[in-house]
Image: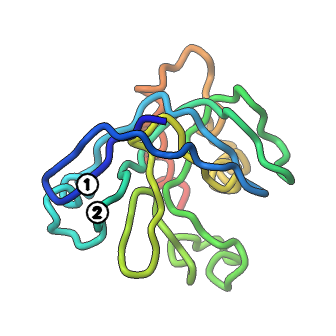
């Protein structure tokens, strides 16, 4: 697949990278639109220290589910979705209290630091745990499954605003 790769600080290139495999409990999303966050800008220039090249950045996105991994319920191929960029474990004390932003094992899409590397959504596809899409539906928010009339470019803004409202 094609992706926008931060190959070194201040250098972005369209690159051919492997399409992510969809694992158990995950969904593969065909990215329709991805916003550029201020943290991506700081990753580009190296000032954040959280985007160590090479990395595919991008974490505010919307698209359609292209594949559903084993064990996923309630989401199907073709569903239009946004998702939370915080990948949380779901099992630690913080997660059990619903404080997933404080998760002991949290990762963020499009971030590479000393502890982990997680490819982001400046790409044709991104794989995420289904729970980062499902948690919004459980709060009766429209951002998880987007109505067909809402363009991906507009839907991606829901991913960030809903995350702030629902936490």
Q: Earlier in the sequence, mark 1 or mark 2?
A: 1
For mark 2, what is the residue?
53
The residue that appears at 72% across and 78% down in the rendered structure is 91
* Element class at badge 2: loop
Position of residue 61 measured from the top left corner of the image (x, y, whole percent): 45, 40
Which residue sits at x=37%, y=51%? 56
Which residue is the site of mark 1? 7
Q: Is residue 144 left or right of residue 73?
A: left
- Residue 68: x percent and y percent? 76, 42
Residue 52: image location, x then y, percent: 29, 68
Query: Label 1 vs label 2: CA separation?
Result: 5 Å
- Would residue 67 be found to the left or right of residue 17 on screen? right
Residue located at (64% from left, 42% from top): 28
Q: Is residue 129 left or right of residue 54?
A: right
Question: In this picture, is 106 found above or below 11?
Answer: below
Q: Position of residue 138 (x, y in %)?
A: 73, 50
Q: Quadrant of residue 89?
A: bottom right
The reply to whether callout 1 and callout 2 are in contact (CB within 8 Å) is yes
Q: Nearer the viewer, residue 128 or 20?
A: 20
**Residue 33 found in image quarter:** top left
The disc at residue 21 is none
């Amino acid at each position: 697949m094609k992706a926008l790769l931060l190959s070194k600080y201040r250098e972005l290139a369209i690159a051919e990278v492997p399409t992510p495999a969809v694992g158990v409990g995950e969904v593969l999303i065909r990215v329709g639109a991805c916003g550029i966050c201020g943290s991506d800008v700081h990753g580009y220039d190296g000032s954040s220290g959280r985007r160590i090249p090479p990395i595919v950045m991008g974490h505010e996105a919307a698209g359609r589910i292209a594949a559903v991994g084993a064990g996923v319920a309630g989401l199907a191929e073709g569903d239009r979705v946004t998702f939370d960029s915080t990948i949380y474990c779901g099992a630690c004390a913080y997660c059990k209290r619903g404080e997933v932003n404080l998760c002991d094992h949290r990762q963020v899409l499009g971030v590479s630091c000393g502890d982990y590397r997680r490819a982001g959504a400046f790409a044709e596809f991104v794989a995420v745990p289904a729970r980062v899409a499902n948690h919004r539906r459980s709060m009766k928010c429209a951002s998880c499954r987007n109505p067909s009339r809402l363009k991906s470019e507009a839907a991606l803004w829901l991913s960030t605003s809903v995350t702030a409202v629902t936490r």
